[in-house]
Image (cartoon, helix red, strand yellow):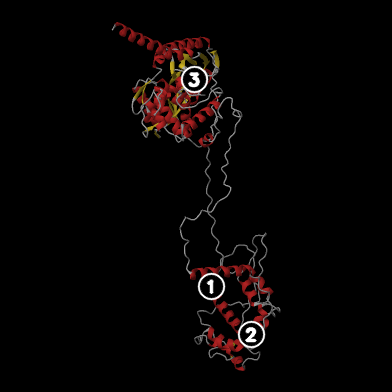
Amino acid sequence: MASLVGRILRAVFVYLVVGTVLVTSPLQAAPFAAIVMDARSGEILYEKNARTRLHPASLTKMMTLYITFQEIEAGRLSLDTKVTVSKYAASQPPSRLGLKPGQKIAVRYLIRAAAVKSANDAAAALGDQIGGDYTAFAKRMTKTARSLGMNDTTFRNANGLTAEGHLSTAYDMNILGRHLFYDFPQYYNIFSRRTADAGVATVRNTNSRFLDGYEGADGIKTGYTSAAGFNLTASAVRGNKRIIATVFGGTSTANRNAKMAELMDLGFGTAKNRVKEQPPETPAPLPSDALVASAEPEIDEIDAEGGAGKTIRVSGGVASSLRPKARPGAPAPAVPDAVALAMAASIDGALAEATAEPAPPGTLDFQAETMAEPAAAVALAEALPAVEVPAELLPEATSLAAAEPVPEPGTLEAQAAALAEGTPPAETPAGIVPEATTLAAAEPAPQPGTLEAQAAALAEEILPAAADPALAAVQPQARPETLAPAAEAPVDLAAAPEEVVTDPGLPEAAPVELALADPQAELTAVETLAAAASMAPPTPAAPTRKAPIFDPVEVAEAPEPQQEEVVVSMSTSGGRHFGVNVGEYPSRYEAERALLKTALAESATLNEGLRKTSQAGGAWRASFMGLTEDQAELACRRLRARAVPCETVGG
C-alpha cells in the first residue's frame, strides 16, 4: 500500500516538472528586444535588438486597427457598418469576445474589443470584412507595413497568433504605434480606456496595470504568446515631451511593465525639452483590394525575388463587345409574311431612292427635285429653259378650266374668267382694256429663257393677239367711295422693291422677279394693290437694312439699362464668425484630446463647429470655430455649468 502511494506521488511530481519545463521554456527562449523613441521627432533614444525579427503577438492588432481606420476615412466603411462573423473568425482561440458564426455586429464594437480586450475573434472579423478572407487581408497588412517604413515585417493573420513567417521587430512596431498616434488622433483615445462597451459584453483593458501605474501613460497595446513572450508598445507624455517605446520578450506582465517603466524614465531623462515636432509622413492610399488580392503567392516575403519592386497591373479595358447568346431552346420570334414583305419593300424603296442617279437637267423630274430644295428655287428660275406647250394639251387645259366652279358675277374672279374666255364681262367698264394694254406695253420685254418668257408665250397662245373689239368699248366701273383714295400715286409694277442698307458685311439679296401668267390678271392685281394701299395703316419706319422689304418691321423698344451691383466683399461663412476657446495646453495632443472630450460632452451645440488647435507662446489653444454668435454663447454657458473653462471668440 505504501509503495503504491509512493509511486503515485512520484508520478505526480514528474508531471509537474515536465509541465513546468514546457510552460517556461518558450518564455526563456523568447529573445529580449527594446527601443525608445522621441515621439515628437522620431529620434531613437535607446535600442537593443530593435531590428531582430521576432513574433509580435497581439501587437499585430495595431495594424488591423490602422487599416480599419483607413477604410473608415476613405468612406468604404463606417463605425455602424454591420459585419457578419465568419466561421473562421468565430473559431479563433482566446482571448475572445465570444462571437458566433453568422452573427452581425457593428464595426465600432469590433474596434473596441480588438483594441481594449485584444480579442482575436474581433480582429479576425475585421480582417474578413475588409479583405474578404484572412489571406488577402494579411497581404494588405504587409503592403501597408511597407508604406509605413516597416521593412522587416510580414503578416499572416489579423490577430497575431503564432504562424510561420508572421514576424516583426521592435523598431517596426514602434513606427506603427507612432503612426497611429499622429495619423488617427481621433481614435487614439480608445487605447487608453480602462473599460469599453463591445456590444455583446463590457471588456476590460489588458494594459490597465501600466496605464494606472506609470505617470503620463496613455496607450497603446499589449501582446502575448508562448513563442513571443510578453510584448508591449506604450506611450506617455510629461510636459511637452512624449515618449513611445516597445518591449519584446518579457517573462511576465510584471517583468514587462517594469522594463517599460525603466525605458520610459530613460527616454524622459534623455529627450530634449524644446524639439520641433515632425509628424511622420502619412502614406499614400493603397490600390483597391482587388489588386491586393491578385498578388502572386509569397510575394510579401522579405527575401522573395522581385518582391521589393513588384508592380501589379490589371487591364480593365474591354477588348470587344460580344453579342449575347440566345437562350437555349428558345424559338426565334415568328414574323408574319405581310409584315416581312412590307419591310422588304420599304427597305428596297429607301435603297433605290438613296442610290438613284439625279435626273438630267431640263426635265420635269429635275425641276421637281430642285424645287424641293428652297435654296435652289431662285437658281432654278434662271436656269430653266423655255417650255413649249403642245397643241394637243390645250383642249385638256380648257376642259379642266371648265370644270372649275363659276365665280359670282361682278367679282374680280368673274372678270378674269371672262377675259380668259375672250368675252367681256357685263359689269366690266370699257376703258379697262386700253389701260391694261398701255400698262402691258410699258413693261420691258422679258428675257428669253426665263419663267416670264414662258408665261408670256403661254398667254399669247391661249389668248389671241386680236381681242374681241367689244372689249375696247367697255369702261371701268367707278370704285366704291369707301375704297376710293383721296389721292393715288400711279403704281409702277416694273419698279424694283425698296432697298435699305443694313449690316455692311452681308451681301445684297438678289431681287426675285415674279411674273403673272395672265396680262388681264395683272390689271386686277394693280387694282387690288391700290385698294389695299388706301386702307392699310401707315408703315412704321424700318431699320436700316439692305434687303427687300416684304413685311412691316416692328422695332422693339430697348430695355432700360440696369444698374450693376458691385460686390466689394462676400462672406463665405454664412454668419459663422464666432467660436469658443476651451483652454490652453502644453502639447498639441492634450489640446486635441480636450477638444474631443468637449465635443463628446457637448455635441448638441458644438456638432457644427470645427475643432482647431493653434500654438502661441509655447502653449496650444483648443478652440471650436465656425459657430454663430448664439451657438457660441449657448455652448459656453453649458460648458461653464459643467465647470469647463470657456470663452467666446470672434465677432
CB contact under 8 Å: marks 1 and 3: no
- Badge 3: how crowded within 10 Å, few (<14), some, or many (20+)? many
Amino acid carrying label 3: it is His
Label 3: which secondary element = loop
Please count the marks in the image.
3
Q: Name the residue beneath numbered marker 2.
A: 459
Q: Earlier in the sequence, mark 1 or mark 3?
A: 3
Nearer the observer, disc 2 or disc 3? Answer: 3
Taking the view exactly as shown, the residue that stands out farthest to the right is 448
Q: CA distance from mark 2 to mark 3?
A: 116 Å
Label 2: which secondary element = helix
* Up-down relation of residue 173 to residue 306 (above or below): above
CB contact under 8 Å: marks 1 and 2: no
Q: Nearer the viewer, residue 482 or 411?
A: 411
Q: CA distance from mark 1 to mark 3?
A: 107 Å
* Up-down relation of residue 376 to residue 475 (above or below): above
The disc label shown at residue 587, or none: none
Q: CA distance from mark 1 to mark 2?
A: 32 Å
- Badge 2: how crowded within 10 Å, few (<14), some, or many (20+)? some
Q: Name the residue beneath numbered marker 1.
A: 536
Image quarter in which the C terminus is found = top left
Q: Position of residue 318 (x, y in %)?
A: 57, 46
Amino acid carrying label 2: it is Ala
Q: Position of residue 561 (x, y in %)?
A: 54, 50
Residue 309 placement, left or right of 10: right
Q: Residue at x 46, y 22 (%)?
A: 162
- Badge 1: how crowded within 10 Å, few (<14), some, or many (20+)? few
Q: Name the residue beneath numbered marker 3.
A: 55
Q: Nearer the viewer, residue 303 or 21?
A: 21
